[in-house]
Image (tube, grey):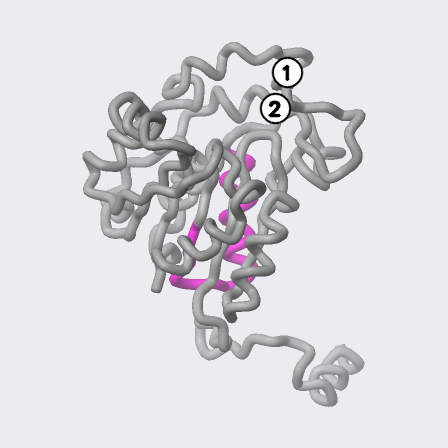
Amino acid sequence: MMLFSAMVATNPFLFADQTVGDSVIDDKKHSFFLVHGMTGGGWDWQIVDQLLSEKGQYVNRVTLTGLGERAHLATPSIGLETHISDVENAIVFENKHKVILVGHSYGGMVIGGVMYRIPDKIFHGIFLDAIVPQHGKSVVDLRHDLLKFRVSDGMIHPAWVSLDSLPPHDVPQPLKTFTDKVSFNDPKIMEIKATFVLFSNNPGERQKRMMNDHSWRRAEAMGWDMKHLISDHNAQRSNPEGLANLLLEIVD
């Protein structure tokens, strides 16, 4: 303990943040926690992270248990609640407040669960072409089309997953993450700023999605801000510059 205290005393830059009471003071403009979608990983956000960091933002790219570089931890027992805990703990152990919580696709269910658990720490929830949670519902309750994927030994194997690819790459995802029910009924959730961003490549697709997409309609009914980005479903890969600029526009 004496050695550690001496290290801190002689190196004031050992910790970038200073703690006052229960709050962390740093010089970053916003604290972004980025949550990837189905079968992805924190690697998905590399370029977006770089672009936001260059603008003075704090960025944490959370990789959910059993996915990305944590694929070696994958078991059929991992569920949505595990992934919610991943993000909750990342925020709590970094001692961040007024968090900008961003979820892509399946990540919308995850960040919705985090908003339910620690609403006082979340300043803005941003759902990127994401599933908007409904209390007591699972991913497959809200997106029946996702039942089409092949399931083997408790793991979902979408067609785009190829384990022969060089990393980083998508990996199979535990089925339980799609069947766990989400909690999303705390009144405090409604006090959190929220934005839904639709990704589409053309006006026709956009109009069709706006008419038929459950998540778009649900977000609109809750009075969220509604945005659009020209992109395919994975803007973090295909249009990271446009996505980073839009995120900054939303929060500034």
Q: Which residue matches tag 1?
A: 154
Measuring from the top left, give residue 174's x and y in whole percent. 61, 24
Secondary structure under badge 1?
loop
Snapshot quadrant of residue 77:
top right
Residue type, mark 2 in image: Pro
Name above or below for residue 127 compared with residue 90. Answer: above
Question: Is residue 31 visible to the viewer in this orientation of the structure?
Answer: yes
Name above or below for residue 42 compared with residue 198. Answer: below
Give the side of residue 147 with respect to residue 138, left or right: right
Residue 183: give its label. Answer: none
Give the side of residue 186 with respect to residue 113, left or right: left
Question: Is residue 134 visible to the viewer in this orientation of the structure?
Answer: no
For the stretch drawn in magenta, the main secondary structure is helix
- Cβ atoms under marks 1 and 2 closer than 8 Å: yes
Residue type, mark 1 in image: Gly
Measuring from the top left, give residue 88's x and y in whole percent. 49, 48
Residue at (75%, 78%) from the top-left corner? Answer: 4
Name above or below for residue 8 compared with residue 178. Answer: below
218 within the magenta span: no
Read off the magenta span: 81-101
Secondary structure under badge 2?
strand
Measuring from the top left, give residue 149's x and y in whole percent. 57, 13
Residue at (26%, 31%) from the top-left corner? Answer: 218
Q: Residues within 10 Å of mark 1 (few under 14, many from 20)?
A: some
* Front one among 184 and 204: 204
* Front one among 63 and 10: 63
Residue at (51%, 49%) from the top-left corner? Answer: 34
Count of picture labels: 2
Residue 174: give its label. Answer: 2
Q: Mark 1 or mark 2, which has the lower sequence index?
A: 1
